[in-house]
Amino acid sequence: MKNFFQDNLNIVINERKKVMIFFLIFIVLISAISIVHTFLFIQKNSYLVDGQLNIIISRIPFNWGPLIENIYSNFEFTQPGYNFEFYLKKFPLNALFLAMILKVSKNIYFFMLIKNMFSSSLIFYFTYMFSKNNHKTFLLFLFLLIGFFIIPYNTYIIFNFVYGDHLTSFLVPLLFLSLVSTYQKNYFVIGILIFILYFIKPSMFFICLAIPFFIIFLEKEKNNYKKFIPSIFLLIAIFSWGTYGLLKTNHFPFGKNLLSNNSYDFSAITNKQFIKLYPNIGVDELVHNKSTIDFLNSSNFNNEWEYYDYFNQKNKVYLKDNLYDYLKTIPKKIYFIFFNIRSDNLRSDYVKINGNPIRYSNIFNKLSLNTAFIISMFILIKNFQNILNYKLEVYYLSLLSLNLLPHIYAWATNKHLVSVFVISNLYLILKLCYSRKYFNKIN
């Protein structure tokens, strides 16, 4: 008996040593890639750093700069508007995360290194624990880890910081791994992921709202009240943000008015030039143009909800009068999501000079997405009567659909789709490897 316990202890110790050595190698690689990525990032975005390579916080684009700067300097979650204060223009979690790292260092190399080491360590930990808890080999763990980083564009987005998508690009895949575990699920971890995703981007709303109910419906363990934990985290997120909005603005933000800037952003799709320019040219040019900025600077809005209502009403009038034109954009967006392999969201002056080149990462991303989609649909259709027994396919297609829904309603760019590409990689890896004996540990 003593030898038995000693042998098992030695196995555990050896495995931990192997994992720690591999983790150190992994972190060294991540650090090297992060440094190269940062160098290339500076070449394209030199306006974001000063002469000492410190990040100029106020210049961080997509409305993040003013919010991060206010959190960094005053720990206040507001940003200036057009003669009023915005409380609900952006979710605070990404801005808070970046502000905390900036407190450590504003040097862009150190900043990016800390951020990327933290994100990559989370990916490492989740994928390792998934493999370990499901009694899979180190080889499957390695394949899953590669699934996050093998496509250069996906790594570029995960390593970026100017988009909120740098977080959703790996957090949604981590949620996927947590959901499809064949081992006893850690519903507390799933709940935390849902809570975090709720506070990153409004496009995560449908995922956060639906997945907790799918869990209750799909997980059939009797008297297992733990499966209600994600729903509790969802309610906490909804009422936390809603209460904050109610106290600050007298409005309870929920659904399409989660953020007061949503109607302004959506006005891009109600621009008649949208169908002509999308997806080659960035839709920001349709919204954030001189005429709109001049109008806003001269406007007399008293608060952010008057601002929201103005654009919301303008969008409603357009959709009522031009519904057919809007519906024509939907096939174009679906085609872009599944088949477009060229670069997207470019500046109009760049397109005039250089055209719209092929982004080779898109070839592999779209191939992975379409292959995973076709295989999962085929399996569910073939086994429709026992559909609830195929949780891998159900959760994959659920996350895929819930992720794409707001982007088909509004618009998608490839950076919005990185989480979809990564979960497609993970689905294919799991589908190809799960039934193979050499990926299973012999206990």
Image: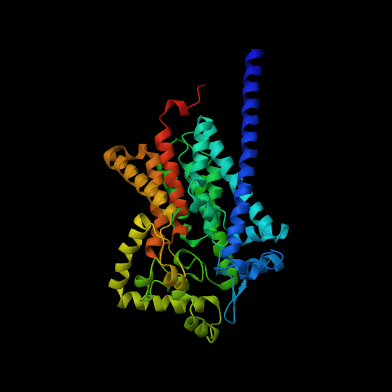
The picture places residue 11, in percent across and down from the top left corner, at 62, 23
Q: Residue at x 46, y 26 (%)?
A: 438
* Nearer the observer, 265 or 209: 265
Q: How many marks?
A: 0
Residue 13 shown left or right of residue 397 in the figure: right
Where, by quadrant of the figure, is residue 281 drawn? bottom left
Look at the image and tell me in which quarter the N terminus lies: top right
* Nearer the observer, 266 or 241: 266
Position of residue 171 relative to residue 91, above or below, is above
Position of residue 202 relative to residue 266, above or below, is above
Q: Residue at x 37, y 42 (%)?
A: 393
Q: Residue at x 63, y 43 (%)?
A: 27
Residue 42 in sight from this viewpoint:
yes
The picture places residue 423, in percent across and down from the top left corner, at 45, 46
Position of residue 15 relative to residue 227, above or below, is above
Position of residue 154 relative to residue 324, above or below, is above
Residue 92 in sight from this viewpoint:
no
The picture places residue 163, in percent across and down from the top left corner, at 54, 61
Residue furthest out toward the front: 353
Q: What colour scheme has been applied to the protein in the rendered image? A: rainbow
Where, by quadrant of the figure, is residue 66 drawn? bottom right
Where, by quadrant of the figure, is residue 356 drawn? bottom left
Q: Residue at x 41, y 67 (%)?
A: 355
The picture places residue 332, in percent across and down from the top left corner, at 32, 63
